[in-house]
Amino acid sequence: HNHSHKHAEETSEKNLFITMTLNFLITIAEVIGGIISGSLSLISDAMHNFSDGIAIIISYIAMRLSRRPKTTKYTFGLKRAEIIAAIVNASTLIIIGFFLIKEAIERFANPSPITGSLMLIVAVVGLIGNIAGTLLLKKGSKNNINIRAAYFHLLSDAISSVAVIIGAVFIIFYKIYWIDPILTILISLYILKMTYQIVKESVDILMMSNPKEIDLNEIKTIVEEITGVLNIHHIHLWKLNDNE
């Protein structure tokens, strides 16, 4: 069992590394394509891909750190490193999200022509890369919450690429350039929503909040049913990381 578990972890780590490389290559391609074609939605999708790459790095580091033995200094181990990294990562993404929304509003006031064909090609490349990433992480996501989070990041990114492809088609055939800033705002709002959830959950963990899936009153009732226990009070319950 230990051998198969270790093999599964090694496979997951390898797949995470491949997916991370794919994400950063897609990011570079989309940033260059977005600048040349003039598509802001392509650049916002690139930022989404970049965030996924960072999320995968965090997942990879977390897997490595979780194997480190506890010490007399770090009696719980280094389980919260991923939580701190998640807050830093999410905070950066919130700044990027607001910046892209500001740029999109300015683009509404001063619309500029966009090369739809290049936008379409780059978005299709991004979609293929994201689908490959989701397939690589699908198996590992069933038993590991870290990989599951990265898997859903990539799945949402694939949907984002589809939105950019639709925008490119409208630009090529109907010359509707205002669809680009609209898609930029929608993708940015989606990123802000996702990052807000990450920040909220991470802050709750760092502030040692009670895990919402566990009822303290139920614990109190169960313990007080034990013979000899008259009362239980001052119950302390918190999470070390997102799943412990």
Image (spheres, rainbow, N blue to C red):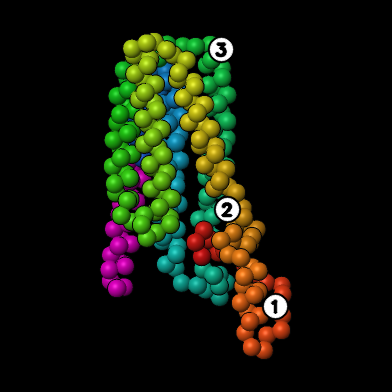
Give the crowd class for mark 1: few <14, some 14-19, many >=20 residues within 10 Å: few
Residue 11 visible somewhere in the drawing: yes
Read off the residue under disc 2: 202
Question: Which residues lie in the magenta part?
Answer: 1-22
Instruction: Please give left or right for residue 168 compared with residue 100 in the image.
Output: left
Q: Secondary structure at mark 1?
A: loop
Camera-nearest residue between 139 and 25? 139
Q: Quadrant of the N terminus?
A: bottom left
> Is residue 111 shown above or below 147?
above
Task: Judge whether 216 appears above or below 42 on screen.
Answer: below
**Rendering quarter of residue 210:** bottom right
Residue 232: assigned label: 1
Helix, strand or loop at mark 3? helix
Marks 3 and 1 sit apart, C-alpha to C-alpha, by 63 Å
The reply to whether discs 3 and 1 touch (Cβ–Cβ < 8 Å) is no
Task: Nearest to the eye among marks 3 and 1: give it.
Answer: 1
